[in-house]
Image (cartoon, rainbow, N blue to C red):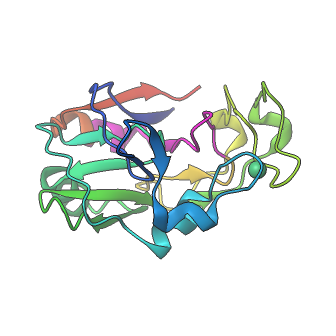
Amino acid sequence: MYFQLFPKDNKIDHWLFHVDDKGGKLITRREYEAMRCNSCGKLDEFAALAAFVPEDVVVNSPWDFVGFSDDFGIAVSRHFVDVIHDHLIKGLAFIPLPGDPRCSLLLPEVFMAVDPALAGFEYPGGKCSSCGRPKEAIIGPLIASVEKPDDPMTIFTGTEHSESVRGRRLNLFCNEQTARILRKSKISGLEIVEAL
Ligand SMILES: [Zn+2]
């Protein structure tokens, strides 16, 4: 049995790739503007964060596991990072947030192949004719379609991701033993659900 890790809805309004302009409108950060697709406006979130991590993002949350409003990013506390390191759980990288020393950005490091025939994706809204990104990718990837890592104590993601109109969602999977450790460690804001 495998489990999926989600940030609970913390009702925060924190953005990684976007900022409010002076008029209260949400716009893409200047640093990411050139990376956006001219047609659909999406960008490769992994490449964007490899190129630039915003310096002014402050999460300021009492939770250990916090989703960003862009749908892609997850900020984690030192407690979460300690739990991962103490239990030698593999598969995650942490990038300290320059603007909020309490928090790090969580990024997956282990991308497992997804069998498209079993993934279960539906693409309401179709795909962008320019960059090929779906407007939305829902339901998938089903866990049966995702190859499993050699080391069972690994938090992993697929090479294909679910997406909202804003961007990719991080589909983080782990095995039963890892899920048990995370549950015992009382990580606030983290929802652990059986993967379908
Ligand atoms: Zn596009």
- Would you identify the image quadrant in which residue 140 lies? top right
Where's residue 165, x and y in %?
62, 34
Residue 29 in view (yes/no): yes
* x and y, in percent, of residue 134 in the image: 76, 40
Q: Quadrant of residue 86?
A: bottom left
Q: Is residue 70 above or below residue 110?
A: above
Residue 135 in picture, x, y percent from top left: 73, 36
Residue 182 pos. (x, y %)? 26, 40
Of residue 80 and residue 135, the one placed in the foreground of this image is 135
Name which residue lies at 19% across and 53% down: 83
Relative to residue 15, is residue 110 depicted above or below? below
Q: Residue 163 in magenta?
A: yes
Would residue 82 be counted in the magenta stretch? no
Q: Give the tally of numbered discs.
A: 0
Left or right of residue 35: residue 100: left
Left of 55 or right of it: where is 36? right
Q: Which residues are magenta?
A: 161-181
Image quarter in which the C terminus is found: top right
**In this rendering, would 18 be left or right of 57?**
right
Quick check: can you spot residue 109? no
Residue beneath the point at 28% across and 63% down: 88
Relative to the observer, which residue lies in front, 44 or 157? 44
Looking at the image, the residue that sits furthest to the front is: 23
Q: Seen in the image, is 41 located left or right of residue 23?
A: right
Frontmost residue, 67 versus 154? 67
